Amino acid sequence: MPLAQTAPLPPFSVHDLPSRTTPSPLSAVQSGHVWGVVPKAWRARPLPGDGVSQEGFEASPRLSRFEHGDGAVQGIEAFWVDVAKERIPSNYYYLAARNEAISALTTGKSCRLASRQILVDHPPDFTGQTFSASDYVATANGTCDAGKRTTQWAYLVAAPGYGPVRDVGIPTSGLYVVIAIVSGHGENATRLLRTMFEGMRFGDTTVSQIMHVAGRLE
């Protein structure tokens, strides 16, 4: 769905939301074209560009620990990469998505993979002899042991390439990444994880919608 061009989006904002479906108060976080909800007690900040045309945010009650990426601290990170600002072939984003999917959450000794779905995987033809959509979409969830605590997590990584996922979300996105982690295993923790993860939006498209479109392709 095309993005509205009437006014520029705010670079970064946080505001409280009324919550009727979760026991904890929630805040809405927006960083450009990325929008999501997090517990009100969490701190949120935009992700630095680091020389790459990425846009997104991270939020956690302990941001410095969350950045370690070991799954021990609850938090969320979501971003996309703008291909219109980078002169990089689409094949790169396919490879980046494949590499991103093999993270500490799936390979770390303290973490366990519960399920993983590769919804789309069309490798690029590096010889250039045949056409390939060069798209890749994968999602997974699992748990990590953090001392006396246990966390549960979910992630999505998607490289739209030239496939149908290109028709949703942000038209110029080469890569989407979402990683969400919450503490505990109870019903409330699971509900919070689902709310944050599936409700994360890129433009007008949620993670749930990206997975739905990708799931219809194979």
Image: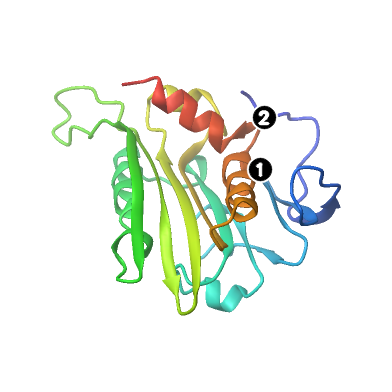
Q: Residues within 10 Å of mark 1 (few under 14, many from 20)?
A: many
Q: Is residue 51 visible?
A: no
Q: Earlier in the sequence, mark 1 or mark 2?
A: 2
Image coordinates for residue 118, horizontal then vertical, percent: 32, 37
Q: What coloring was used for the rendering?
A: rainbow
Image coordinates for residue 124, horizontal then vertical, percent: 23, 34
Image quadrant for the N terminus?
top right
Image coordinates for residue 15, horizontal then vertical, percent: 84, 54
Q: Secondary structure at mark 1?
A: loop
Q: Nearer the viewer, residue 168 or 188?
A: 188
Q: Give the residue type that dot 1 points to.
A: His
Q: Is residue 214 visible?
A: yes
- Residue under label 2, please give it: 3
**102 relative position to 74: left or right:** left
- Residue under label 1, please give it: 33
Rendered position, 45 above or below 133? below
Rendered position, 42 above or below 52? below
Disc 1 to disc 2, how far (Cα)?
9 Å
**36 relative position to 143: left or right:** right
